[in-house]
Image (spheres, rainbow, N blue to C red):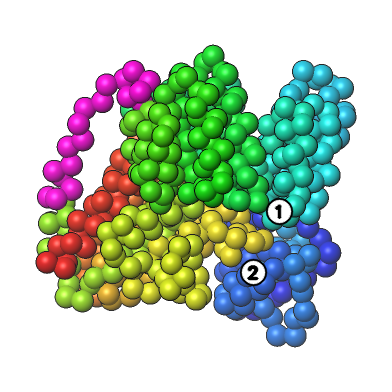
Amino acid sequence: MAVTTKIWSDTYYDSVTLMLGSSMISALPGIDEAMVLMGTDRNKTVIRASGLIAEGTGSFGPNDIVIGIRSEDEAAARTAIETLEAFLTSKKGSGDRNITARTLAGALREDPGINLAMISVPGRYARAEVEKALDSGLHVMLFSDNVPLEDEIALKDRALEKGLLMMGPDCGTAIVNGCALGFANVVRRGNIGLVAAAGTGLQEITVLIDRLGGGVSQALGTGGRDLKEDVGGRMMGLCLEALRDDPATEVIAILSKPPHPSVVEKMKAIIATIGKPVVACFLGADEDALAGTHAVYAKDCEQCARIAVELAGTALPEKDEAWIRETAAAEAALLAPGQRYLRGLYSGGTLCYEAMLAFRDAGIPAYSNIAIDRELLLENPDLSREHTLVDMGEDFFTNGMPHPMIDLRMRIERMARDCAEPDVAVLLLDCVGGYGTHDDPAGALAPAIVSAKAAAKAQGRHLPVIASVTASEGDPQVRSAQEQTLRDAGAIVCDCNAQAVRLAFAILDRIEA
């Protein structure tokens, strides 16, 4: 096998396009493996670990595209590179043909009724583009990350002056008047309005509301930093006021990590003006965070969805989870001596954080790349130890790479590596569907689950795999189909992430006993 490496200097394509290019040339005759990546520090590690850097390859940086190919011969590699170049050229061409307007001004000329712009550009360019949109009277959903904090504050102040929403930066999910934006799901319309500083958490709650028989009026994202002291809840406040005044919204749900105390006081003042039921889920905050208001406390996404649906007028049956005890007993009985640790590999940051908090509240140390306790922070996010929960959508993993809700390869590789450890007892996974995500995430995970369980069995071990699906029946992936695919692969499928964590705890308790 020959290894060929090609560097295209000062060339940029987004990570999803490069992922598609990688997949396409990997399938060509004579190609054993191929990677096409931006040359970020993280991607240097990935491509070198794969052995796809040929001897004598020069230096490269984050503004360069790196193509690494292992092939039967040099001719196959040359063909692959030519095919990739043609593909990327066609992507530029086809994109131009599909665009009816090249500029914001042109789009507004085409349709003066446009009132919202979704912006996704590298963070250093975001401010200029958002300012154009706000000055044109448009609400903004800013998908970009790595936007300087001072730019976020300035943009939100500008939006507030104009009475406009500026959702983001790093706002990945929203549903506005029934239109799903970014990573969002197809859920029924209804009377529950949501505002969240957590994208995957917003997805989790909206699909649970849908599954429980409720419906969503609006689901607005603020960006993850909005409730920090510096930003001061600027957009959270405006979103709450918008939902307060929205006639289609009769119940309001709030989701975020614990706000700064100064932001909590601002929120209390706004909640006092809302004559509608409010449920607040501040993951990891004290139950009395909004004491003195009529807001109802929820400890996790599942409880938030259930309370919101009940407040909206739908009666729910009591949860019957006797099956958790029975399943845990059966699974724990099959484990080999020495199996005692859990590995949670998440594509959804909020879901990983929710699991991490559950471990903390249970008094079980769990290492993580997003740990609250610095003593439990993974020194190297690529290396697990003891109980480990990893947010694989965190910047360390996504800098120059597609998000794991789009491209599951990094998580699949991590599954094989972690599950090969003889002391691993449980694998915990999320599977996130909806617009913008992988078209069949369960289908991509299933072979890896089968392989991990088979490898464990060959070593005389049993490997319980616990999964939850964040998707609706109306999503392109179809929730029930995703769940069945995971079950067919040998996974135990739970109704939601919180329930999956409870099952994992029940198995771990049996091990301790």
Above or below, comparing residue 101 to residue 505 in the picture: above
Amino acid carrying mark 2 in the image = Asn
Report the Cα–Cα distance between label 1 and label 2: 25 Å
Q: Nearer the viewer, residue 439 or 29?
A: 439
Whether residue 320 sits left or right of residue 411 in the image: it is left
Where is residue 362 shown, x and y percent of the image? Answer: 27, 59
Label 1: which secondary element: helix
Image spot of residue 220 (x, y percent): 57, 33
Label 1 amino acid? Leu
Question: Where does residue 403 sit, x and y in percent of width and height?
Answer: 57, 53
Task: Tell me the tag on residue 149.
Answer: 1
270 in the magenta segment:
no
User: Magenta part of the protein: which range?
Assistant: 309-326
**Residue sitting nearer the eye, 15 or 136:** 136
SS at mark 2 in the image:
helix
Q: Are marks 1 and 2 in contact (CB under 8 Å)?
A: no
* The residue positioned farthest toward the front in the image shown: 292
